Image (spheres, rainbow, N blue to C red):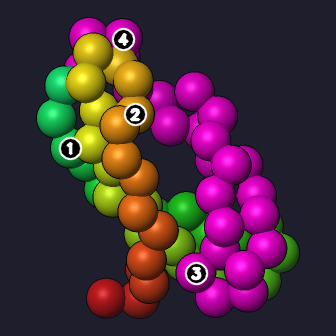
Amino acid sequence: MYKLITCFFCFEQFEVLLEIDTSFTGSDSEIYDCEICCNPNKLDYEAYDGEINRINVGDGNE
């Protein structure tokens, strides 16, 4: 599933591919480098039955 996110650092938007199973329920974190400024963005998301309910983009330098 592709999601459009806004970079935590440069505020540009880019797409990320979140590969979650259609039956996945729970939360996960992943790091994606911005396609524009190359800084790491940490995505925290929650899903229910493979659908993302909440997504938060933060500093991936932690």
- Camera-side mark, 1 or 2: 2
Q: Residue at x 50, y 37 (%)?
A: 18
Look at mark 1 in the image and give the residue it sits on: 27
The N terminus, quarter of image? top right
Report which quarter residue 27 is drawn in: top left
Image coordinates of residue 35 in percent, x first then y, are 78, 67
Label 3 amino acid? Phe
Residue 34 lies within the magenta run:
no
Labels 3 and 2: the sequence-earlier one:
3
User: Which of the labelled discs sits on residue 8, or is there none?
Assistant: 3
Label 4 amino acid? Thr
Is residue 33 shown above or below 40? above
Look at mark 4 in the image and give the residue it sits on: 22
Q: Secondary structure at mark 4?
A: loop
Asked if residue 30 can be seen in this view, the reply is: no
Q: Are marks 1 and 4 in contact (CB under 8 Å)?
A: no
Image-based side of 38 in relation to 59, left or right: right
Q: Residue at x 33, y 58 (%)?
A: 44
Image coordinates of residue 23 in percent, x first then y, are 26, 11
Labels 1 and 3: the sequence-earlier one:
3
The C terminus, quarter of image? bottom left
Look at mark 2 in the image and give the residue it sits on: 52
Distance from disc 4 to disc 2, alpha carbons, whole Å, reads 10 Å
Labels 1 and 2: the sequence-earlier one:
1
Residue at the farthest top position: 23
Label 1 amino acid? Ser
Q: Residue at x 72, y 80 (%)?
A: 11
Q: Secondary structure at mark 3?
A: loop
Labels 4 and 2: the sequence-earlier one:
4
